[in-house]
């Protein structure tokens, strides 16, 4: 497992990782999302939707695909939100 997915797993255990489209966009609308992580095989539509929603935080594209993220995090998705600035900075450094 790569370092990015390991940190995402820690963020999930801490309750600071949102998984899935609806959860991520709720965090974006509420202003709690510090960063959004997209897998390498995520649709470009997600980036356009984030821009349309006015998300001004970091968008991080990881080299892991949905299957790898699903195995590492226990839930398969291509979009994740990080609700903690410390985790967001640490994850950004690994990419």
Image (tube, rainbow, N blue to C red):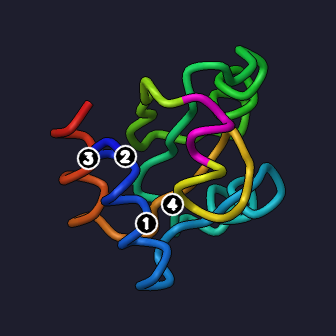
Q: What element carries label 4?
A: loop
Q: In this view, does 74 lie to the left or right of 68?
A: right
Residue 87 among magenta residues: no
Write the residue at 68% across / 56% down: 24
Label at residue 9 = 1
- Alpha-carbon distance for marks 1 and 4? 16 Å
What residue is shown with label 2? Answer: 1
Q: Is mark 1 on a helix, strand or loop?
A: helix
Up-down relation of residue 42 to residue 35 (above or below): above
Badge nearest the viewer, 1 or 2: 2
Which residue is nearer to you in this view: 25 or 68?
A: 68
Residue 81 sits in quarter: bottom right
Find residue 33 and name its label. 4
Would residue 3 be seen by someone viewing this image from the given angle? yes
- Please say if 1 is above or below 43: below
Q: Which residues are the magenta region?
A: 65-69
Give the CA distance from mark 3 to mark 2: 7 Å
Q: Give the quarter of the image for residue 2.
A: top left
Q: Which residue lies furthest to the right in this view?
A: 22
Where is residue 86? Give x, y as percent: 21, 66
Marks 3 and 2: which is nearer the front?
A: 2
Q: Which of 25 and 43 is in front in this view?
A: 43
């Amino acid at each position: 497992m790569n370092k990015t997915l390991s940190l995402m797993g820690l963020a999930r255990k801490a309750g600071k990782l949102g998984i899935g489209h609806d959860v991520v966009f709720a965090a974006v609308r509420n202003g709690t999302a510090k960063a959004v992580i997209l897998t390498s095989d995520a649709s470009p539509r997600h980036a356009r939707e984030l821009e349309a929603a006015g998300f001004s935080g970091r968008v991080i594209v990881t080299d892991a695909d949905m299957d790898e993220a699903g195995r590492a995090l226990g839930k398969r998705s291509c979009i994740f939100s990080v609700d903690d600035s410390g985790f967001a900075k640490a994850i950004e450094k690994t990419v």
